């Protein structure tokens, strides 16, 4: 579990601002699931999805997402992982491959998995709700932002301790949210040896 608790370049929970926010979210106490719920709601509702709001700058590090209050789904998942890890809750990154509209092309979608003692690994999606998107924290039931509806869409079973290289390539090289949208990351991660693969996640 240690890699899912680590503070890293992009999941930088030891950054003072991220740590302070994590401590604030934990201040009301409760079980780990209660703290995870507050972290989830904070990222889902208080951090704006960059494309929904056409809001720059492009963020990637958890601390930058918190500082600017905006991020694509991938960046928001980095912040949620950081807040959870700062509170001692193992957390990683998950990906789906979805259509951008109702047909190809495809792109990756970023979300999280958190280890909750009562439920094991539980996926949660803090992308941000809007008409047609209703993600919730309701373990043991999963209620993610998107369902697979188009042939070719995929739900990858791995949990990544670090952001996938394809995601970093997009977020770190594109200068604006519009440029990221034009170069969204994509790929079939089914046989990717990078993630720590955990049985029975799905």
Image (cartoon, helix red, strand yellow):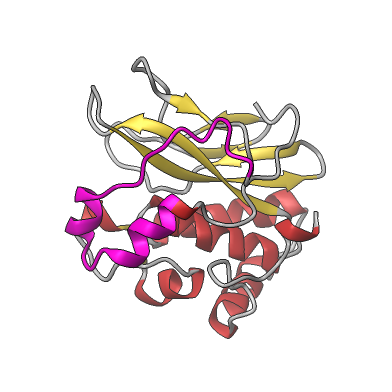
Q: Position of residue 28 (x, y in %)?
A: 68, 66
Q: Residue 56, relative to residue 128: is it above or below?
A: below
Image quadrant holding the N terminus, namely bottom right
x, y percent for residue 115 = 74, 46
Q: Residue at x 46, y 25 (%)?
A: 154
> Where the C terminus falls, by quadrant?
top right
Say if residue 9 shows up in the picture.
Answer: yes
- Residue 5: x and y in percent read 73, 62
Q: Is residue 170 left or right of residue 18?
A: left
Bounds of the magenta segment: 166-193
Q: Is residue 114 magenta?
A: no
Instruction: Indicate left or right for 24 with 105 as reference.
Output: right
Q: Is residue 178 magenta?
A: yes
Determine whether 21 is above or below 33 in the image. below
Q: Position of residue 76 (x, y in %)?
A: 45, 57
Please tell me which residue is depicted at 31% across the width and 65% down the height of the picture.
173
Residue 44 seen? no
**Residue drawn at (53%, 56%) of the image:** 163
- Residue 138: quadrant of the picture: top right
């Amino acid at each position: 579990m240690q890699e899912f608790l680590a503070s890293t370049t992009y999941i930088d929970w030891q950054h003072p601002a991220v740590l302070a926010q994590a401590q604030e979210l934990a201040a009301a106490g409760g079980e780990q699931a209660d703290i995870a719920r507050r972290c989830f709601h904070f990222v889902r509702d208080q951090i704006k999805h960059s494309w929904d709001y056409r809001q720059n700058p492009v963020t990637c590090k958890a601390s930058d997402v918190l500082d600017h209050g905006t991020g694509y789904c991938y960046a928001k998942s980095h912040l949620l992982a950081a807040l959870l890890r700062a509170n001692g809750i193992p957390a990683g990154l998950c990906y789906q491959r979805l259509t951008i509209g109702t047909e190809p092309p495809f792109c990756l979608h970023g979300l999280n998995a958190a280890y909750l003692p009562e439920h094991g690994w539980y996926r949660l999606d803090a992308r941000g709700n809007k008409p047609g998107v209703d993600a919730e924290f309701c373990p043991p039931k999963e209620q993610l932002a998107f369902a697979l509806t188009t042939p070719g869409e995929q739900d990858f079973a791995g949990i990544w301790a670090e952001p996938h290289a394809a995601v970093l390539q997009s977020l770190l090289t594109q200068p604006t949210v519009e440029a990221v949208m034009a170069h969204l990351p994509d790929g079939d991660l089914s046989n990717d040896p990078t993630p720590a693969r955990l049985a029975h996640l799905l």
